[in-house]
Amino acid sequence: PIASKGAVALAGFVLIVLAWPILSVAGTGLAAQLTTGSEGTAMGAFNASTALATVAGTFASGPLVRMLGYRVVPLLALAGLIAALALS
């Protein structure tokens, strides 16, 4: 069982490593293409919001996992996805 959990974790890590650059580049490109204003302003706002989300997630994740446990992580991710879809 431990070996299979390790394999799943490794596969998930590889998937994230492969997907992250694609998402990052595509997000920046879409911010530039879909803006009605300045492309530079849109890209700056996108990069600033991404940086802010990274910092907030880094600081918030430790205490949340400590209080709620790792089993809640997918539920919090789903809540974040629903909130993002509602705001879009």
Image: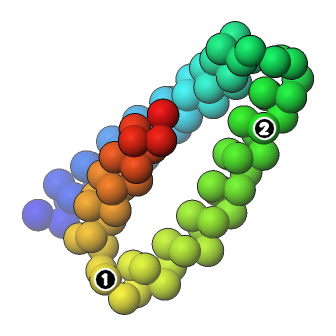
**Residue 77 drawn at (x, y percent):** 36, 55
Picture coordinates of residue 47, whole percent (x, y): 76, 39
Question: From the viewer's perspective, is 12 left or right of 25?
Answer: left
Q: Label 2: which residue?
A: 45
Residue at the extreme top: 33
- Label 1 and label 2: CA atoms lie apart by 32 Å
Asked which secondary structure carries label 1, the reply is helix
Residue at image location 39% in from the left, 79% down from the top: 65
Query: Is residue 9 visible in this depiction of the protein?
Result: no
Q: Nearer the viewer, residue 16 or 71?
A: 71
Q: Amino acid at mark 2?
A: Ala
- Disc number lying in front (1 or 2): 2
Q: Residue furthest bottom?
A: 67
Q: Secondary structure at mark 2?
A: helix
| Residue name at image x 33 percent, y 56 percent | 79
Residue with the mark numbered 1: 68
Residue lying at 27% horizontally and 70% vertically, measured from the top left: 72
Disc on res. 57: none
6 vs 47: above or below: below
What is the x, y in percent for residue 7? 26, 49
Would residue 81 be found to the left or right of residue 47 on screen?
left
Q: Where is residue 85 drawn, in percent x and y?
A: 40, 38
